[in-house]
Amino acid sequence: MTKIAFPFTLLVTVLVCLAPAAPAQAQAARTFVSAAGSDSNNCTTPATPCRHLQSAYSATSPGGEIAVLDPANYGSLTITGPISIEGNNGWAFLSAGSGAAAITINALGATDKINIRGVVLDGLGTANNTGIQFNSGGTLTVGDSLIRNFGNVGILFQPNSSGQSQLFVSNTLVSDNTGDGIQIFPSGSGTTLAALDHVEMENNEASGVEAVLSTQTVNVTVSDSVSANNVIGIAANVPIVSQRANAAAGGSVVSIMVRNSTIANNSLSGLLANSGTVLVTRSTITGNATAWTAADSGVVSSYGDNNIDGNTNVNTEPPNPLPYK
């Protein structure tokens, strides 16, 4: 009886075809990073953590959480969807190279929520880098964090949106940046709401916080916070000349409410309204070159209950006192 040869390569091909396909690795609701981790791990348990936040983010399902297990530099991070990052009170250190951001947010969903807690972002004095750059998404919440030494802005909130965008910052130090500590400069036809609570904005080479006239309506509340040793403490400002026409055509409004806060030792002005309105109540304004400045169409208004003293110029309450309602 004649035997028929069965080529080995054909046998392998048949067996592979008959074998069930291996399932793709599923994303987990909670992942982990560690100084001792590896980006080849699945990141899904404390025993198998990733080494960098970007790898853990790829392994995390939308709306999930990344937990930091120990102190380390976890690299820069780009976010494209809802996520929570638990930095464990400063264990997560991130930095960025020239022209880059430590955390870039390009969330694809208009209502996506990004929560960042307990991180240390340090620009290391590198030129033109940014701490957190928010380009799109619904809400950015930053808490219990330190953002410093960036060559541009500490937090740059600049969504282009037709809906509502929100920024919440609490219990956070934003300091020693070459630009603004926090800059709010959205575009599009939507609205932007921002609330800063127990935020320290110090030693920035522009404004502690600046809300810029845009095509949107922008409302900012600053409460129980400190803006000190910047050029300007708190500013409602106009954009660069080439962008003013578009901003004016959009009919935008910028309004900043300052309550229970300290605005001190800023080299140009404590409060600046170069567009829109700055309202101030129960706050201390001292040691600034000028306590407050209203220019062009800007208005600074007071509830008449502030401590304004020790400034080189203007130690008086702003005009147009507002009644409590």
Image (cartoon, grey):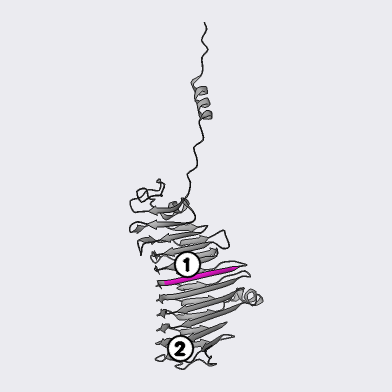
Residue denoted by label 1: 141
Q: Amino acid at mark 2?
A: Ala
User: Relative to 5, does residue 38 appear above or below in the rendering?
Assistant: below
| Viewer-side residue, 321 vs 310 | 321
Instruction: Please report the residue visible at 49 percent of the width from the left and 25 percent of the height from the top.
Output: 12
Q: Earlier in the sequence, mark 1 or mark 2?
A: 1
Residue stretch in magenta? 163-170
Q: Position of residue 266 (x, y in %)?
A: 42, 83
Q: Residues within 10 Å of mark 1 (few under 14, many from 20)?
A: some
Q: Image point 57% across, 60% down: which residue? A: 109
Question: From the image, which quarter does the C terminus lie in?
Answer: bottom right
Residue 200 shown left or right of residue 13 in the figure: left
Kindly state the secondary structure of the residue where label 1 is placed. Answer: strand
Determine whether, in the image, residue 304 is placed left or right of residue 254: left
Which amino acid, mark 1?
A: Thr
Q: In 3D space, how far apart are the residues under numbered discs 1 and 2 (Cα atoms)?
A: 30 Å
Residue 264 x, y percent position in the rendering: 40, 84
Which residue reaches farthest right? 249
117 and 146: which is toward the camera: 117
Which residue appears at 52% of the width and 66% of the height? Answer: 139
- Residue farthest along the top direction in this orientation: 1
The residue where tag 2 is placed is 291
Residue 30 lies in the magenta-colored region: no
